[in-house]
Image (spheres, grey):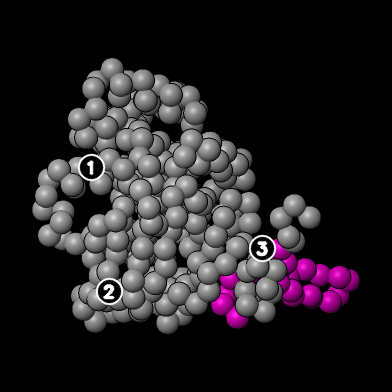
Amino acid sequence: MAGPLFELRDVRYAYHGKYPALRGVSLSIERGTRVALVGANGTGKSTLLAMLDALIFPDGGAVLAMGKELTAELFEDAGFSLEFRRRVGFVFQNPEVQLFCPTVEEDIAFGPLQLGAPVPEIRARLERLSSVFKLSDILGRAPHQLSVGEKRKVTLASVLAIEPEVLLLDEPTAGLDPQTVRDIIAVLLAEHGGGKTIVFATHDLHLVEEFADVVHVMGPEKNLIRSAAPGDILLDQDFLEMNNLVHIHAHRHADMLHIHAHRHSRRGA
């Protein structure tokens, strides 16, 4: 199918009609790409992801997905709604939003079950994802008993269980230990290698550096202020500091405290 997978055209949105979250955002997302949404807190990244997943609809402008404008009226068509939910999966920033079944096993199986997948196929997906995420020993546990890292793995597994074409991820590595981050990145690389389009919001510039093909930067006015390849943005130290996108390190030499911004090197250098 020709054209971008997603397209936002001058999208505007305000919560409760009075708290602006997006102001005039226009961008496109091509099939098979890995797209990072970055920006300081409160710049609209999560709102943009929710709009791509048709959880909310714009107050102005238009969001197109797979050649169709996403509207509340369109999702009244049960057939279209089912097909869209089968093709697009969303992993929320807070795992508690998605984990609601009595056990891990039931949470992973819930999505494909609701979408009408055959039971033997659901069982095969469950076994595969349990192995990939090393969850076999906790399938019978209640989600609230899990660590943060385990919860994130279960939420990602529950979305991958529906075998979507598109993954939308809100801060997929936030608050995780380095090994869990490596595990999740390995899974995402494998999923992308299988043809998935992946769009993720993050503050982790190392994840952007390693994983993204293109970066869209949201600014304090809830608008898109820059779109470029990761290297172009990560090497622009002034731009990063101006938009609160760098980690500030403090360390001592003798009796002197030195404060400086973390710098990124070009990928492959």
What residue is rendered at 49% in x and 56% in y?
A: 35
Residue 19 is situated, as x and y percent measured from the top left of the image, at 28, 79
Circle 2 crowding by C-alpha within 10 Å: few under 14, some 14–19, many from 20 = some
Dot 1 and dot 3 residues touching (CB under 8 Å): no
Residue on which the image places disc 1: 83
* Residue at the limit of the structure toward the front, as seen here: 2
Q: Which residues are magenta?
A: 242-264
Specify whether 45 is left or right of 192: left
Mark number, residue 231: 3
Residue 65 is situated, as x and y percent measured from the top left of the image, at 31, 56
What residue is rendered at 24% in x and 61% in y?
A: 69
**Which residue type does callout 3 highlight?**
Gly
Cα distance in 3D space between marks 3 and 2:
30 Å
Mark number, residue 93: none
Does 221 appear above or below 210?
below
Question: SS for tag 2?
Answer: strand
Residue 140 is situated, as x and y percent measured from the top left of the image, at 34, 25
Residue on which the image places disc 2: 61
**Which residue type does callout 2 highlight?**
Gly
Cα distance in 3D space between marks 2 and 1:
24 Å
Circle 1 crowding by C-alpha within 10 Å: few under 14, some 14–19, many from 20 = few
What residue is rendered at 38% in x and 74% in y?
A: 25
Cα distance in 3D space between marks 1 and 3:
36 Å
Residue 60 is situated, as x and y percent measured from the top left of the image, at 25, 76
Does 158 appear above or below 258?
above
Does 2 appear above or below 145?
below
Q: Which is more toward the observer, 195 or 210?
A: 195
Question: SS for tag 1?
Answer: helix
Q: Which is more toward the observer, 13 or 31?
A: 31
Mark 1 or mark 3: whose residue is earlier in sequence: 1
**139 magenta-colored:** no
Circle 3 crowding by C-alpha within 10 Å: few under 14, some 14–19, many from 20 = some
